[in-house]
Image (spheres, grey):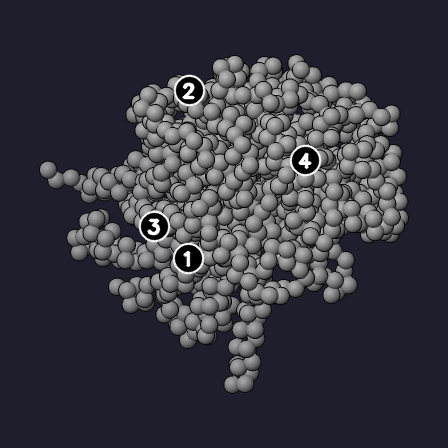
Amino acid sequence: MKLSRKARSGIAGYLFLTPWLLGLLAFTAIPMIASLYFSFTDYDMLTDPVWSGINNYKALFADPKFRSSLVVTFKFVFISVPLQLAFALFIAVILKQDRRGAKIYRAIYYLPSLFGGSVAVAILWKELFNKEGVFNQILGVFGIEGINWIATPSTALNTLIVLAVWQFGASMVIFLSSLKQIPQDYYEAATIDGASKPKQFFSITLPLLTPMVFFNVVMQIINAFQSFTSAYIVSGGTGGPMDSTLFYSLYLYTKGFRQFSMGYASAMAWILLLIIGVVTALLFASAKKWVYYD
Amino acid sequence: MKKKILASALCLVMMASLASCGGDKDADTSNKSGDASTGDVSIRWSWWGDTKRHELYNSIADKFEEKNPGIKVEREPNSWNDYWDKLSVQVAGGNAPDMMGMHVQYSSDYAGRGALLDLQPFVDDGTIDVSKVEQSVLDTGKMDGVFCMVPMAVTTASLITNKTLLDEYGIEYPAYNEDWTWDEFAAAGKKFKDATNGEIWFSNDWATGSTNNIRYWARIKGEEAFTPEGDIAWSEGTVAEWLTMWKELRDEGIIPDAATSNEDGTLALEQKIFTTRKCAMHNVPANQLYLYQEQMPDDEIILLRQPIGNDGSQGAIIEGAHWSISPKSSHQKEAAMLINFWTNDEDAVNIYKMDQGVPINNELASKITADLSESDTKCIEFVQSYMEVASAYTPAPIGASEIDTEVKNFGQAVGFGEMTPEQAAKDLTAKAKEITEKNKK
Amino acid sequence: MAKRRFKTFCVHFFIILFGLIMLYPLLWMLSASFKTSTEIFQGTNFFPEAPTFDSYVQGWEGIMGIPFWQFFANSFTIVLFVMLGNIISCLPTAYAFSKLKFPLRSLWFTIMMGTLMLPMHVKLIPTYIVFNNLGWVNTFLPMIVPSFFATQGFFIFLMTQYMRGLPKELDEAATVDGCGPFRSFIQITVPLSVPAIVTTAIFSFLWTWNDFFTQNIYLTETKKYTVSMALRQFTDAMGNSSWGALFAMSVLSLIPLFLMFVLFQSYLVDGITAGSVKG
């Protein structure tokens, strides 16, 4: 039996997809559907869930902390992600060239992202940003008296944004991995044509890099919306001071694991999924306009 | 159509897995927990703590195995936060440890939902011997009238105090076994602040602390924080008075500003303002004295009582963490034996000594006093004298940890000047009532 | 010539200066690991007054008689399998999404992206129940097995984007040569995707090594604890923390992550040569 090319490609597609499909069924779908079910129940983890309809969702929209945590999270996402990616791209382009010491430089800039959610980060961040911290000592040189940045409601979130931007190394690695994918002869041709370095960046590098820029934007946004560890560690799990670092995921965790409202937390999770879904869909829709595939 | 079939298949799988979690786990618990009849049983013991405590409890488990051949103890040590994350998932997943630590912050939530076994039968049949334990101490393990937790040890709240600092500035304070009133406390604070030019704070901020502080204050005012039925028992006025008192102390510079207090709450012991000599007093459970003394070898650290009401009314509470057993455990008897070993075995007590406070077995508690460190001696004397005026309290209802978060938040709101004490007291009380109502069902 | 030299000097100067600022917290930790516990918080100097290895010795002794190397061994075991699993399962998935046409492709892709969007905390309990019923609690399997089934959407999406960026002419040439999807996957796409594979390896390593939440939930016996779990035992909100040991072991735990990057960065950055692109 001879199959058409289309059918063959279809079969091949599903064959290649098999591991993922199995994983989806076995490990991902069940927890996701279960959490959707929990979101319609009163579930305290210690006793069986009790169906409660849309009560959790109703309660959510009346919850001032739900709103304030959304605001905090949106601020965090839309400030930290662009900053982080701009840094990552800028440094990646500079470090792409094989100048002397490039390998060491790359490693240095990558190092902070190794820290992840290490408990040591909490201590480090306090060393930097508390009243007697290094940051204030530097300000002191210029005669400015600093405040306790981490424990003041209006500035606490900023320190977490700095923390996120500081760990730009991960995005940088992804940029580096695709920068070298750009054939060198494009640049050679451009140089012969007399194009300046910045012009080359905007006319060659950036367009050819758009698939990975797109990837980084999407992933960083998805991750930033679910940001948890940094706030959890730096605020000691409270989201304080005055809920100023109460990220959505941190509130969700507190509700679920600290206050035994797993049903409520699940409802929060699905609302977040919707929000991220909408943002991501918008990004994908916009991609046709600016992402360049060869 | 296809999608429908797929969806229902998924649902089935999910239901099956959920159903099996609810049911009895004994049937299919893995070979880890062997058969009792062969005398080869394995129980899981889980606790929170630091690495020093891990070592201590590890050797207690070794001792227990040595004296009870045929019972193996699997140890599950963890640090505080991770402990509670793990425990809730384990209980939810039907895989709770046999013996587990409980703390006032979460015990209401676990006990109220039937996650703790009634231990009275084991007391009745003699497996757990409580004959050498004060009734008031045992009462702290009763939740809703059911004895479901055995105290690990007893401790009380205290003011750890930097004696060296106070003496340096000529401040007077009571002896460890004497009371002082809030007015005396505030007056001493004022004097201290003037003497140090406001460079060192007198005390940490209690108003941004846990529910226990409000509980203490309510008792001074002749109230309780909660009723036995699980309602809020404090009055709005009482809380307003409490918050106002601390606001005044804060405004006068006797206690730190809100940002400093907030940070202090998240700092490691080594970095706290008390440890770094920026503050002369700090309210913590008395058994933590040695931790601070170790960090501050050049200062003499002592324990003082919490102030009493200006009319002389006492609010002191017996505190301490507890051991409990999971009702799903298939080796409840063996777990009860381990709890009894903890409570009444001289070797065990000699290992943990003052780790959690004063051991609850009176005979053994007096035996260990001989070879205690200086800090532990201070602690045991302090707690034993404070116990004479302290009493057990009405435990919080389900939702305690959520109420605790609100107490801290409203305390902070006043601290940061976003709310007046009166407004905060009103909103906090309303919020707390809402939480208890919600959980009553 | 002199002008150019000056320019190069400036570039290096700023890269190093900025790098030092970036590294300050790490250097602080490194320095702290050679201090005594008291000096870490009360000393005023950046450099240790009398460098000591005590913290390393204390940390290396481990917890409850289980030496720290055991935790390293556990972490390595998990990490190596997860790395392998992610690579061999995400490659074909990404290939399907980026190069093959099949019915419902965009639906499956949307679902795949959707799996990335649900916070892990609400999935923990149902997942735990599944693994508990499989008898996998207190084994490394809950961490390892899912990675062989491409459950980490991040890597699928990463590879998909990377493969979509690969020149189309190569596939077309291969098709003309009579190459089926399997041969062109093995012979063209995979070799060209080395940087994406290396990135996947690096990130799998990093995330699995640093993850404490999942590992803490599933591993109960102390001798099965991983590095990230063991590190967290050194700090305790209610008791005495061993900061020295924490910093010392944190430094050691960063070394494998760092080496991994140093060793693989040439694959990452050199990637494909111009020659292979031209085909």
Q: Which residue is mark 1?
A: C256
**Are labels 2 and 4 assigned to the same chain?**
yes
Mark toward the start of the polypeptide (3 vs 1)? 3
Q: Residue C63 appears at what percent x and percent y?
A: 47, 46
Q: Residue at x 37, y 61 (%)?
A: C264
| SS of the residue under disc 2 | helix
Q: Nearer the viewer, mark 2 or mark 4?
A: 4
Q: Nearer the viewer, mark 4 or mark 1?
A: 4
Q: Chain of mark 1?
A: C
Which is more toward the observer, B115 or A27? B115
Q: CA distance from mark 3 to mark 2?
A: 35 Å
Mark toward the start of the polypeptide (2 vs 4)? 2
Q: Is residue A19 left or right of residue B18?
A: left
Q: Which residue is mark 4?
A: B380
Q: Nearer the viewer, mark 4 or mark 3?
A: 4
Marks 4 and 1 in Cβ contact (< 8 Å):
no
Q: Which residue is mark 2?
A: B22
Q: CA distance from mark 3 to mark 1?
A: 12 Å
